[in-house]
């Protein structure tokens, strides 16, 4: 690997011994010999299999649930409904005081998306659990559903989630996350050109090779060991503790080995119900998503819609940016209010713009709840921003890379969130990119530096 | 459910089990015999994580009924290293950083082994073709391809 030591030579530490040195990964020997223990590699005598009865409707009231036929099915040990869950309404981020609790472990009275968990069936074999799940009778009154964020925000739209009272998340700062810096309208008034564009994205599934799940073993003394592939061990432990109203000391979580996640395994969905099953039956329980469930039920990256309006001068300076962002949370919050908030922080981009106005909304619809995925909240922002940057450069007849040099933030520049820029290396990255891509830029840009002495 | 007797050689040892008729080889290996090196990623023959070698041929154990394996010789990734010495492919996967989460690794190694058994000096295209039935979601294909080519070179040096 080539290290460019000419950059930041006067502030560089050169006595490091680890960076740039190859080190073997500690888990690789287990991977190549097939000895690494993923959660599903644990097998316990008498283990039960959990299968979920899921809503076939996007939005429906539950009139009644009849589990009698399922309970009589050979091999069935226990059937769980909402009334079995000690604290059935929860939300993941309540642990960091972000409420309200808005999602049910098992649906109670209403389903808000197609695939929502309604009844859990525990049986001696996977097949028996599947067959019994098919015998659960749920009587639904189908309600009007809303699948589009703009429709959801219109007055009179079907209310997706009563725990919010309206189809958007109410932040403590209001109906959206806001960034206000300078005077955006004055910026537009003085701009040579204005460009307003809309961008939108679809949900994206992570599709980890190992599906989501957990295996739970009762240890006696009302203590449970949960082998899980969660990516968020303590979120899972603490939320399970709340949902099951059990002290965390009764719950022993074993994880750390995850067969691909990409953010798709940070929600707390399988563990609480599997532990509850183990608690109520006294037997080990395995709850593993089928591939079909993984693709349809697990929370995808949110669909987003972004409207960006920029004011730009003929010399290449962006003087004003106004952004409205919408994040489709689906029916429940999960991590989406946070994703929308991250977008608000990100829309100025790595550029120094004197006048910025940003609103980002987290919107509820009757779609699969979205959640974390690889830079959620900022990845679509970056796509939109950088396409917009290319369009702006074209608009004023400037090279797109040179256009970015003009606007790139440098140390000491004030960002729209009123944090001074520190440790920026964007200029240097673009210089390297220019060389690597054989995309020449004018010599004055190659002479620039992010690092300003005294900044 | 009817139980059927099944006998086969797994990684050099004789196995004899009574299994439920209709059980996949993947479930029989993992749940009955305790060899969890084949992984269940999709259970529908598309991800390759459950790949094993049956009588020298690459097979998807999730689509193979255990009862059809009577009298066969089966190799899984857990049977590749001998008395603690890694197989050249395993060594190469370590040396090229070809594992990330490790879930696809056993299937990848099985697919690569069948390729090298049949074609000791494969071209890059042949490696890509041989691995095309195995999905890696941690974007690790390039190091995996490099691992197989490295193991092939090690093989040819040993033979020379």
Image (cartoon, rainbow, N blue to C red):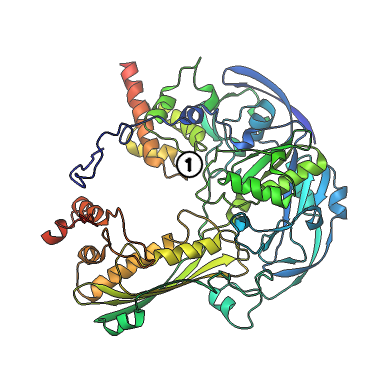
Q: Is residue A174 visible?
A: yes
Q: Is A395 above or below relative to B86?
A: below
Q: Is A211 above or below relative to B39?
A: below
- The quadrant of the picture occupied by the C terminus of chain B is top left
Q: Provide residue A147's location: percent of width, then percent of height.
A: 59, 72
- The quadrant of the picture occupied by the N terminus of chain B is top right
Q: Provide residue A194's location: percent of width, then percent of height.
A: 30, 80
Q: Which residue corresponds to the image point at 38% horizontal and 62% vertical from the top-left? A: A382
Q: Provide residue A234's location: percent of width, then percent of height.
A: 60, 45
- Depth check: give the residue in front, B105 or B158: B105
In the displayed structure image, the side of residue A196 where residue A218 appears, left or right? right
Residue extending farthest to the left is A443
- Depth check: give the residue in front, A351 or A205: A351
- Depth check: give the residue in front, A307 or A407: A407
Q: Is residue B68 visible?
A: no
Residue extending farthest to the top is B83
Q: Which residue corresponds to the image point at 63% horizontal and 47% vertical from the top-left? A: A236
Dot 1 corresponds to which residue?
B133
How dense is the environment of label 1, judged by Cα within 10 Å: few (below 14), some, or many (20 and up)? some
Q: Which residue corresponds to the image point at 60% horizontal and 49% vertical from the top-left? A: A235
**Number of marks:** 1
Question: What secondary structure is found at the residue carrying circle 1?
Answer: loop
In the displayed structure image, the side of residue A227 where residue A341 appears, left or right? left
* Disc 1: host chain: B
Write down the quadrant of residue B7 in the picture: top right
Residue extending farthest to the bottom is A189
Residue extending farthest to the front is A454
Q: Provide residue A340's location: percent of width, then percent of height.
A: 50, 65
- Depth check: give the residue in front, A426 or A160: A426
């Amino acid at each position: 690997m080539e290290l460019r030591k000419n950059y930041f030579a006067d502030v560089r530490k050169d006595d490091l011994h680890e960076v740039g040195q190859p080190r073997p990964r500690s888990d690789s020997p287990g991977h190549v010999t097939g000895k690494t223990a993923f959660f599903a590699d644990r097998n316990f005598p008498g283990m039960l299999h959990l299968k979920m009865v899921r809503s076939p409707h996007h939005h429906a009231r539950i009139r009644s649930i009849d589990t009698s036929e399922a309970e009589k099915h050979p091999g069935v040990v226990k059937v769980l409904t909402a009334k079995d869950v000690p604290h059935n309404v929860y939300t993941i981020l309540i642990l960091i005081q972000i409420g309200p609790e808005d999602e049910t472990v098992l649906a109670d009275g209403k389903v808000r998306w197609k695939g929502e968990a309604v009844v859990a069936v525990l049986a001696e074999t996977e097949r028996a659990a599947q067959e019994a799940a098919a015998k659960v009778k749920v009587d639904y009154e189908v309600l009007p559903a809303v699948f589009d964020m703009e429709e959801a925000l219109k007055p009179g739209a079907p209310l997706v989630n009563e725990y919010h009272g309206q189809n958007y998340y109410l932040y403590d700062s209001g109906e959206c996350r806001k960034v206000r810096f300078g005077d955006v309208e004055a910026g537009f008034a003085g701009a040579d050109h204005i460009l307003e564009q809309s961008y939108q994205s679809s949900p994206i599934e992570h599709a980890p090779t190992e599906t989501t799940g957990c295996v739970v073993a009762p240890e006696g003394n009302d203590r449970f060991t949960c082998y899980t592939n969660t990516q968020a061990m303590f979120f899972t432990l603490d939320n399970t503790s709340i949902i099951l109203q059990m002290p965390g000391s009764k719950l022993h979580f074993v994880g750390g080995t995850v067969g691909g996640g990409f953010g798709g395994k940070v929600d707390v969905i399988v563990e609480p119900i599997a532990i509850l099953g183990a608690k109520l039956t006294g037997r080990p329980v395995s709850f593993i998503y089928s591939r079909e469930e993984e693709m349809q039920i697990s929370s995808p990256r949110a669909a987003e819609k972004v409207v960006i309006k920029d004011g730009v001068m003929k010399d290449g300076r962006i003087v004003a940016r106004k952004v409205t962002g919408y994040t489709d949370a689906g029916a429940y919050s999960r991590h989406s209010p946070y994703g929308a908030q991250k977008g608000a922080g990100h829309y100025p981009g790595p550029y120094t713009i004197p006048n910025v106005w940003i609103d980002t909304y987290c919107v509820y619809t009757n779609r699969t709840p979205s959640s974390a995925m690889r830079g959620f909240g900022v990845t679509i922002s970056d796509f939109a921003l950088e396409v917009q940057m290319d369009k702006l450069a074209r608009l004023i007849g400037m090279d797109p890379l040179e256009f970015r040099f003009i606007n790139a933030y440098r140390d000491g520049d004030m960002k729209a969130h009123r944090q001074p820029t520190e440790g920026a290396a964007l200029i240097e990255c673009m210089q390297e990119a220019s060389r690597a891509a054989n995309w020449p830029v004018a010599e004055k840009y190659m002479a620039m530096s992010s690092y300003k002495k005294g900044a | 459910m009817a139980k059927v007797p099944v006998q086969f050689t797994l990684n050099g040892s004789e196995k004899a089990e009574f299994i439920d008729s209709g059980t996949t080889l993947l479930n029989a290996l993992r749940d009955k015999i305790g060899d969890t090196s084949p992984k269940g990623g999709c259970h529908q023959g598309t991800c390759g994580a459950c790949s094993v070698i049956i009588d020298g041929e690459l097979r998807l154990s999730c689509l193979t009924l255990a009862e059809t394996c009577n009298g066969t010789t089966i190799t899984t990734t857990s049977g590749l290293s001998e008395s603690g010495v890694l197989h050249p492919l395993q060594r190469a996967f370590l040396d090229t950083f070809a594992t990330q989460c490790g879930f696809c690794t056993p299937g990848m190694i099985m697919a690569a082994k069948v390729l090298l058994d049949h074609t000791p000096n494969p071209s890059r295209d042949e490696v890509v073709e041989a691995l095309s039935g195995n999905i890696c979601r941690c974007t690790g294909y390039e190091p995996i391809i490099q691992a197989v080519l490295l193991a092939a070179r090690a093989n040819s040096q040993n033979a020379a």
